[in-house]
Amino acid sequence: MKVAIGSGKGGTGKTLLSTSLALSLEYVRYLDLDVEEPNGHIFIKPDIREKIPFSIPVPEIDFNRCTYCGECAKACEFGAIFVGTNTVNVFEKLCHGCASCKLACPENAISERPYVVGEISIGRRDKIEYIMGYLKLTEALSTPLIRHIKKEYGMVSGDIIMDAPPGTSCPFVQSISDTDFVILITEPTPFGLSDLEISVEIVRDMKLKAGIVINRADLGSEEVKEKIKGLGLPVLLEIPFSKDIAVGYSKGIPLVDVLPEYREKMKKLWERIREMV
Amino acid sequence: MRIAVSATEADYNVAGVDPRFGRCSFFVIYDTETGEWSSFPNPAKDAVGGAAIKAVEFLKSKNVDVVVTGNLGPNATSSLTAAGIRAITGVTGKVLNAVKRAGE
């Protein structure tokens, strides 16, 4: 069963929930897809045995063949190529590695070279297989890395937990696509609700099964909480706003070690999701 | 010589210099040989990414020789260089004055 944990608003507890689930289950694979700032390892503390660089193919121009016709730039959906009067600029940071330019070139002047944008770490801690994507600083495109991790490490049978990035744009969509269930974790504040509403819309649009976990459930107003419950998705769990959880979190101590009774709750949550899937 | 100014409005008589290049509202173009003014909405204004590059592509298609604007980023600078378009940056105030100064 593949389950993604997303939130819309950042800082509502995606990693808190993802790591707590992973540490409570038997034999699970953990994919940290929050590649701009992966932090699951702080709580899971895996032994990393391998680090693999990740690159995307970017165009390389053969200037002996190029006629500066500009077809490559026209084909590029992302404006990553600029054709000048006697040179061609490639903007690697805008390139999605789709190869449209290569296909569009009538002179066959474009080949591809790898451009490293990040790294994948692979490790283990007891029964958790841990895979983390890391996008290099100054790089802006996380989607190809997320797609690659899901394709390479997310297609196995068994239980997979995916810690999705915040927001509701492409990286989030990429993270939750082809999952069996999406847990949306939120907090009962107007910001939490606003982003949750967008997330729910996306999940519905993608026809994915989903449920809600309310973190810091005793914060905010009852009115907001009622609205969350009125979104039409089941509320699977409520986690209180507790100083102990926050202090533990700040020290890298997972929720299930601060409050051991949450191991049982996490197992139950997982079983309930399995029934819904 | 064709001078393009990143402009806040289409009307060159009232427009100010837009400090942004890639996402400016309009490009006002003045041709020093014919004395002709033209203005175009910037097609890159709402681009998802790489706005400056698209803007330079547009100016290149309009046979612009010089760009007058507030500030240029690295992508804009390298694209302008590749296109052989000169740039005058740090310009503020009215488009009319900017063009006059650039012409000199």
Image (tube, coloured by chain):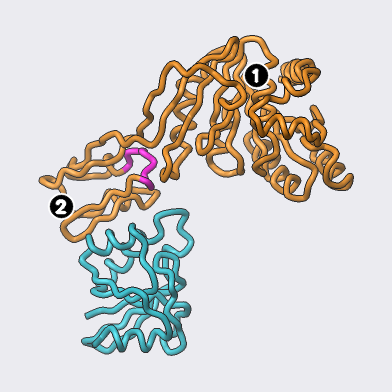
Chain colours: A orange, B cyan
Q: Is B74 or A178 nearer to us in this picture?
A: B74
A53 relative to A228 in the view: left or right: left
First in sequence, mark 2 or 1: give its number. Answer: 1
| Span colored in magenta | A93-100
Identified by mark 1, the residue type is Ala
B59 relative to A18 in the view: left or right: left
The answer to which quarter of the image holds residue A213 is top right
Badge 1: few (under 14), some or many (20 or more) residues near its Cα, within 10 Å?
many
Which element type, helix, strand or loop, lies under badge 2? loop
Q: Residue A67: which numbered mark, if any?
A: 2
Which element type, helix, strand or loop, lies under badge 1? helix
- Contact check, label 2 and label 1, Cβ < 8 Å: no
Name the chain letter of the residue that bears numbered label 1: A
Q: In whole angstroms, how far apart are the C-alphas of marks 2 and 1?
A: 55 Å
Residue A194 within the magenta-colored segment of the rendering? no
Residue A98 within the magenta-colored segment of the rendering? yes
Across and down, in percent, residue A22 comes to 65, 19
Residue A272 in sight from this viewpoint: no
Image quarter where the N terminus of chain B lies is bottom left
Image position of A189 with respect to B102: above or below: above
Q: Residue at x 23, y 74 (%)?
A: B65
Q: Residue at x 78, y 31 (%)?
A: A244
Query: What residue did someone put label 1 on?
Result: A22
**Nearest-to-viewer mark from 2 and 1:** 1
Across and down, in percent, residue B19 comes to 43, 73
